[in-house]
Image (cartoon, rainbow, N blue to C red):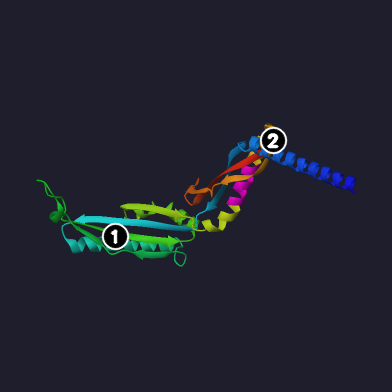
C-alpha cells in the first residue's frame, strides 16, 4: 500500500512537471511570437453607372428696360424647354425653371464708370433624371441651340451614385480577402503562416469620376494586421 502511494505521488509530480513544461513552452512561444506581425492593405474597386444626374442650364441677358429683358430671357427659356422635349426628355426627366434673378446694375456698381446696361437677368433650368446616359447624350447636342439663336450663359451636369450601401458589404469582403492573400504571400516568403487578425480598420471608401461623365469609380482600402506563427 505504501509502495502504491509513493508511485501515485511520483506520477502526480511527473504530471505536474509536464504541465509546467508545457506552460513554460507556451509562454516562451508567445513571447517570441508576440511581435511577429504583418500589416497589409486590401483593395476592392468597381466601376458603376451613376444613377442620378442634375443638369443646370442658365440663360442671361442685359438691357436698360427690365421688363423687356425678362421677356427676352423667358422666350429663350421656352426655346430650351422645346429643345429638351424634342430630344425625348418628357416623362424621363423632371424639368423645373427657377424664377428670374434680376440684378440692378446701376444700384450695385462702384467707381466712376457706370455699367453699360441697367439690368441683368438670369434664369436657370434644372433637369433631374435617373437616366444618366440619356441626359449625357442630350447635353452633347446642346450646340444645336446656337442655330436656334439661343446662347447659354452656363451649362453643367452633376452625376451621383446613390446605391453605395448596396455595394458596401460585398466590397468590404473582397478587400479583406485580398488583404489575406497578400498577408499569406508575405508569410510564405518568410517561412511562416498567418495566425489571426490583430487589428483591422473599417476601410476607407471613395467615389471618384470615371472615364465618361456618367461613370463612377468606387473603391475601398482596408488595412489589416495579422499575427504570424511558425
111 in relation to 94, above or below:
above
Q: Residues within 10 Å of mark 1 (few under 14, many from 20)?
A: many
Whether the magenta-drawn stretch holds residue 177 is answered as: yes
Nearest the eye: 19 or 88? 19
Mark 2 = which residue? 192
Nearer to the camera, 28 or 147? 28
Element under disc 1:
strand
Marks 2/1: CA distance?
A: 68 Å
Q: Is residue 216 visible?
A: yes
Residue projecting furthest to the left: 112
Measured as percent of width and height from the top left, residue 72 is found at 25, 61
Residue drawn 56% across and 54% down?
Answer: 168
In the rendered image, residue 82, in percent from the top left (x then y), is placed at 38, 63
User: Does 64 sit above or below residue 32?
Assistant: below
Magenta part mainly helix, strand or loop?
helix
Region rendered in magenta: 172-180
Query: On the image, numbered disc 1 is attached to which residue?
Result: 123
Q: Nearer the viewer, residue 212 or 206?
A: 206
Dot 2 or dot 1, earlier in sequence: 1
Amino acid at each position: 500500500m505504501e509502495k502504491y502511494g509513493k508511485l501515485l505521488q511520483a506520477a502526480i509530480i511527473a504530471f505536474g512537471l509536464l504541465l509546467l513544461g508545457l506552460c513554460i513552452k507556451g509562454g516562451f512561444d508567445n513571447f517570441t511570437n508576440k511581435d511577429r506581425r504583418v500589416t497589409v492593405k486590401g483593395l476592392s474597386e468597381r466601376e458603376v453607372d451613376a444613377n442620378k444626374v442634375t443638369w443646370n442650364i442658365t440663360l442671361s441677358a442685359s438691357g436698360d428696360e427690365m421688363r423687356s429683358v425678362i421677356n427676352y430671357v423667358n422666350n429663350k427659356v421656352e426655346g430650351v424647354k422645346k429643345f429638351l422635349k424634342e430630344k425625348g426628355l418628357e416623362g424621363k426627366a423632371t424639368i423645373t425653371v427657377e424664377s428670374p434673378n434680376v440684378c440692378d446694375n446701376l444700384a450695385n456698381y462702384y467707381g466712376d464708370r457706370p455699367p453699360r446696361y441697367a439690368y441683368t437677368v438670369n434664369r436657370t433650368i434644372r433637369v433631374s433624371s435617373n437616366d444618366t446616359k440619356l441626359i449625357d447624350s442630350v447635353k452633347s447636342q446642346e450646340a444645336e441651340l446656337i442655330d436656334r439663336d439661343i446662347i447659354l450663359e452656363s451649362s453643367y451636369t452633376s452625376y451621383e451614385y446613390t446605391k453605395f450601401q448596396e455595394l458596401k458589404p460585398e466590397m468590404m469582403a473582397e478587400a479583406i480577402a485580398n488583404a489575406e492573400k497578400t498577408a499569406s504571400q508575405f508569410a510564405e516568403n518568410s517561412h511562416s503562416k498567418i495566425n489571426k487578425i490583430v487589428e483591422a480598420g473599417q476601410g476607407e471608401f471613395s467615389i471618384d469620376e470615371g472615364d465618361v461623365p456618367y461613370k463612377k469609380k468606387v473603391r475601398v482600402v482596408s488595412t489589416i494586421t495579422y499575427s504570424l506563427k511558425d
